[in-house]
């Protein structure tokens, strides 16, 4: 097996057991933690800080065909270049009319935070136009945006002459969540449909057919929902069976839960649903919903539930009918704060929608599974030749429509794969908000890498790997990237995968005051296209597989070798810390002249720290080779091979004596301790020994290693050289000045003699 960085050894069971608790303690620690400063210095973070007259970015539209990123903001729609979001930006101004703003203000709304046109819907409409909708100062409005057919057209303008009513497409209130999907010229949207924000519904508008919606003011259908996502998922190879799936959270229905509680939901409806003929006219006849469970099994059947659905991402597979559903949850509990990611497959979702239905006979009865006769065709079935043979929902029998109206909820919930979350965070100071997933090639196959946005402005890069099988997954937190200067809530993320440079685009709102920023993380921080890691079997400690392989092919050793010196009875610190924050450090020792390595035993004299090995009192027997290994997931990688040479204390007098003899050869080279050519006991050098430096090693209160000492020595030597050079320069300047003075004096003497000769009387 070609393991990551190819310097891997399987650790013995004894060592693993001894470090199991320490490894578990690091489970929430990312392998790499990159600060905001480090992200900027790496040139992998590009930030667009917003325009003076535009803020509150609400929605993304990634158009990789045109190489543009469209962003809906307050009173504006922006267009960014995917290559560099700071260059070649375009802007459309779309504020509400002054009349709408005044009406909004008179209704008691905040003029700055609410009485504006916040763009909440942004979708491709056809090959040349986008469809956009905004709140319109509590008067929703929609319009078409021309973007051209080709990237070189460079068109970006609003067709203001053709405005449409945005009711049922965009919410009135900018604080309310909305989710929508535009497909085949029809817009499916989960949103609020009134000024007060009380009438929530799932709408289908646009297109040739009459608008259609969910039943109004019926808590069995929707109970104060907050919509998260809308997706089209085929049911079969027949397009007539295509279904729209909606993800939202809502208050639990009366009788479902003791007290007020939130439930995560997945809803379905048929794409070719046109409502009933005599009942449910212009209402959905195929709408069903089920609960999404994301919980941790507990003792005595008491589970810890994550019910606040925050975001959903569908990872496509080879079969378009069966994508993998990733969902982000937080807790609604007042007892603890936590987040989780659960993964679902469509087979389980479809099985739940096959029944049983949730049922109760009256308001005082608990919800139970319906055990009576279910009418044919089964409610929720799409009218098609595949199932039932009906041409339209308007042809469905009355008993089917009546049953569908009173039984929109399923009794059984949808459980996640393996019946538990794949990621759990309950002891951290942040919560998850957004999620995108990318499929990455590794040495041992493909893996789904998750990028999770948080409410403090960090992005987590996480992968789940099977310990033995896919029924036993283990979370691996690869990186934690701080992408904003201040703690801020990440509100939207999009991943560009078709461009040459893969980029992660992020939106956030600063301090909840509707001042928003946008940034892009370049491919260097996503997953490194030049690196392939063996995630399942290999050691994921380092990020240098290909680079190390190249070094090995060229015959160069990538293992760091180092030589240090110490004086008997002094202390020394052997520094070594793995790059991965989740790895443990394991030390071995090999005596001089021996081949066998032994594990170092800790005691009062030899102490282990996260940064290295501290030897409080050096002994001659400590001379030898120290090996520093990083341990993670049952594998060990050697990071450092360090040769320690201990100089006996009784040699100091001899060294001092020999130093007083100018003809004696110094026994110790003054070269850097890391130089493998240095010979501490040899006599091949003519350089003197700095004995005061040896003495400073003895129980020095500040210096922990010879490296620190030599760094001071080198600095002192450089300072002395500079001082000597300065003195020589000053001496030379003084000599030059004296020489010039002498020349001037000689010149003056010659001039005086000449003048005297000119004045002398001539002889007759």
Image: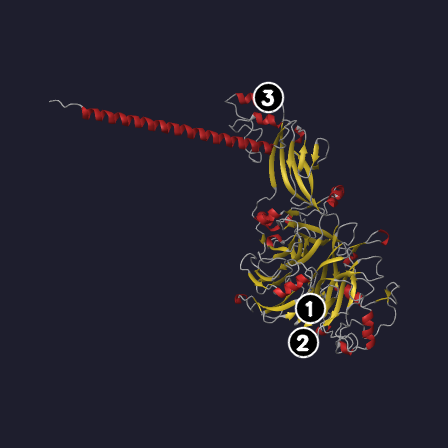
Number of other residues with Cα within 10 Å of mark 3, as a class: few under 14, some 14 to 19, many 20 or more? few
Residue 588, percent across and down?
A: 68, 38
Residue 672 in view = yes
> Which circle marks residue 208 in the picture?
2
Vertical relation: 718 (above or below) 532: above
Estimate the spatial distance between the alpha carbons at disc 2 and disc 3, rounded to whole Å.
Answer: 102 Å
Alpha carbons under labels 1 and 2: distance apart: 17 Å
Q: Which residue is mark 3?
A: 653
Mark earlier in primary sequence (3, 1): 1
* Horizontal and vertical percent position of residue 290: 79, 64
Q: Is residue 86 left or right of residue 371?
A: left
Name the residue that disc number 1 marks.
167
**Residue 521 vs residue 466, the one in the foreground:** 521
Of residues 240 and 711, the one nearer the viewer is 240
Question: Residue 336: which disc?
Answer: none
Q: Which quadrant of the view contains residue 131?
A: bottom right
Query: Residue 281, percent across and down?
Result: 76, 75
């Amino acid at each position: 097996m070609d393991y990551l960085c190819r310097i891997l050894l399987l650790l013995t069971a004894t060592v693993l057991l001894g470090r199991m608790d320490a490894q578990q303690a690091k489970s929430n620690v990312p392998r790499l933690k990159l600060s905001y400063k480090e992200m900027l210095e790496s040139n992998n973070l590009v930030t667009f800080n917003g325009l003076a007259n535009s803020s509150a970015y609400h929605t993304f539209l990634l158009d990789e065909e045109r190489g543009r990123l469209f962003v809906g903001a307050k009173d504006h729609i922006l267009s960014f270049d995917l290559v560099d979001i700071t260059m070649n930006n375009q802007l459309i101004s779309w504020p509400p009319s002054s009349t709408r703003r005044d009406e909004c203000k008179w209704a008691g709304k905040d003029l700055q935070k609410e009485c504006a046109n916040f763009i909440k819907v942004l979708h491709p409409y056809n090959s040349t136009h986008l469809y956009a909708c905004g709140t319109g100062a509590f008067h929703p409005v929609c319009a078409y945006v021309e973007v051209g057919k080709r990237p070189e057209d460079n068109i970006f303008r609003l067709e203001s002459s053709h405005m449409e009513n945005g009711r049922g497409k965009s919410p009135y209130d900018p604080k309310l969540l909305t989710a929508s999907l535009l497909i085949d010229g029809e817009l499916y949207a989960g949103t609020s449909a009134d000024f007060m924000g009380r009438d929530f519904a799932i709408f289908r508008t646009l297109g040739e057919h009459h608008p259609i919606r969910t039943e109004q003011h019926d808590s069995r259908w929707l109970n104060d929902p907050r919509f998260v996502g809308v997706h089209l998922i085929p049911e079969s190879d027949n397009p007539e069976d295509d279904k729209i799936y909606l993800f939202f959270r809502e208050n639990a229905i009366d009788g479902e839960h003791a007290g007020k509680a939130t439930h995560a939901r997945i809803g379905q409806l048929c794409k070719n649903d046109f409502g009933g003929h005599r009942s449910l006219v212009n209402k959905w006849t195929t709408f069903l919903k089920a609960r999404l469970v994301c919980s941790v099994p507990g003792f005595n059947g008491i589970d810890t539930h994550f019910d606040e659905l925050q975001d959903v991402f569908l990872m496509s597979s080879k079969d378009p009918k069966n994508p993998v559903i990733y969902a982000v949850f937080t807790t609604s509990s007042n007892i603890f704060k936590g987040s989780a990611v659960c993964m679902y497959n469509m087979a389980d979702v479809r099985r739940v929608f096959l029944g049983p239905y949730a049922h109760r006979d009256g308001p005082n009865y608990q919800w139970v599974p319906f055990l009576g006769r279910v009418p044919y065709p089964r409610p929720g079935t799409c009218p098609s030749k595949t199932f039932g043979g009906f041409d339209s929902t308007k042809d469905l029998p009355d008993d089917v429509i009546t049953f569908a109206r009173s039984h929109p909820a399923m009794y059984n919930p949808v459980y996640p794969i393996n019946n538990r979350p794949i990621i759990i965070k309950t002891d951290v100071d942040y919560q998850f908000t957004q999620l995108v997933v990318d499929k990455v090639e590794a040495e041992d196959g493909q893996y789904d890498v998750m990028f999770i946005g948080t409410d403090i402005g960090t992005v987590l890069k996480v992968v789940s790997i099977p310990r033995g099988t896919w029924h036993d997954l283990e979370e691996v937190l690869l990186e934690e990237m701080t992408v904003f200067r201040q703690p801020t809530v990440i509100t939207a993320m999009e991943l560009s995968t078709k461009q040459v440079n893969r980029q992660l685009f992020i939106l956030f709102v600063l301090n909840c005051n509707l001042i928003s920023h946008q940034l892009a993380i370049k491919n260097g921080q996503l997953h490194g296209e030049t690196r392939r890691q063996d995630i399942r079997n290999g050691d994921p400690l380092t990020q240098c597989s290909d680079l190390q392989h190249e070094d090995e092919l060229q015959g160069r050793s990538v293992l760091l070798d180092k030589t240090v010196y110490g004086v008997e009875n002094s202390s020394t610190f052997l520094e070594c810390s793995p790059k991965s924050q989740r790895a443990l450090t394991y030390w071995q020792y090999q005596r001089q002249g021996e081949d066998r390595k032994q594990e170092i035993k800790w005691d009062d004299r030899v102490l282990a720290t996260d940064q290295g090995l501290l030897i409080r009192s050096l002994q001659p027997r400590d001379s030898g080779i120290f090996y520093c290994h990083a341990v993670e997931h049952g594998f060990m990688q050697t990071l450092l091979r360090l040769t320690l040479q201990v100089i006996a204390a009784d040699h100091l007098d001899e060294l001092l004596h020999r130093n007083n003899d100018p003809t004696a050869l110094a026994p110790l080279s003054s070269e850097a301790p890391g130089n493998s050519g240095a010979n501490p006991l040899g006599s091949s050098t003519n350089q003197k020994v700095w004995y005061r430096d040896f003495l400073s090693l003895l129980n020095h209160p500040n210096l922990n290693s010879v490296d620190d000492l030599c760094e001071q020595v080198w600095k002192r030597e450089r300072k002395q050289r500079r001082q000597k050079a300065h003195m020589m320069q000053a001496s030379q300047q003084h000599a030059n000045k004296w020489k010039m003075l002498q020349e001037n004096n000689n010149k003056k003497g010659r001039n005086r003699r000449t003048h005297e000769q000119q004045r002398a009387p001539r002889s007759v």
